[in-house]
Amino acid sequence: MYGGKELDVPITKDMQLYVKQAYSKYSARMEEERMETELTLKRKMDLKKKRKSDEKLLKENEERKINEKEKEVKQDEAQLNDRFAKATDVFEEANKRLATAIKNKKNSVMNVAQGLLEVAKADLDKVKVSMEKCREQRSEIDRKRRKLIDSYQSKQTSLVGKSDQNE
């Protein structure tokens, strides 16, 4: 109605054709927008999957590195324990020789025993320093492992929180 009066507009074949064309264009545009929306959503999902996959690979790689480092530290500790045992044996042997040399008052044996004591003590000191480094490395490995576990737990917590929000 226009100004209280109805307009008499004749419906012609051309007008029907224009309406059909307009509707086809509208439908095509709506389909295009739907396809773009789906494509955008698919890209976002693919990107999210890729990020998740990359994150998983990074964590697995980090975990592998931590395990390799821990294995190296264990091997180093085993070697250091062997060196420590050998140095302790040399130290005890040198003490026995020195005690025997003092008892028998043999200066040449005393000098040899004294030299052995110095070598054994120096080796023990080196081993102790190396063992301390291994302890520091082990604590660093433990710290990294805790950090990795915490990141897994925080990821799980955030996933649980998201699923609760979706319900």
Image: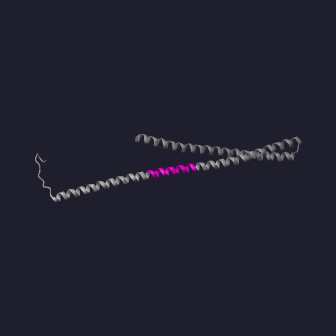
117 with respect to 40 (left or right): right
Magenta stretch: dominant secondary structure: helix
Where residue 14 appears, as percent x and y from the top left, is: 17, 59
Where residue 119 appears, as percent x and y from the top left, is: 77, 47
Q: Find out whether residue 51 is within the magenta segment.
A: yes
139 with respect to 15 (left or right): right
Q: Residue furthest right?
A: 104
Q: Find out whether residue 41 is within the magenta segment.
A: no
Q: Considering depth in this image, is 102 or 151 the residue closer to the camera?
A: 151
| Quadrant of the image containing the C terminus | top left
Q: Considering depth in this image, is 76 or 5 the residue closer to the camera?
A: 5
What is the total number of numbered labels drawn onto the structure image?
Answer: 0
The residue at the point 33 percent across, 53 percent down is: 34
Where residue 94 appears, as percent x and y from the top left, is: 81, 44
Residue 121 to residue 12: above or below: above
Q: Considering depth in this image, is 131 or 63 the residue closer to the camera?
A: 63
The residue at the point 23 percent across, 56 percent down is: 22
The type of colouring in the image is: one colour
The residue at the point 29 percent across, 53 percent down is: 30
Where residue 118 appears, as percent x and y from the top left, is: 78, 46
The residue at the point 60 percent across, 48 percent down is: 67
Q: Which residues are magenta?
A: 48-64
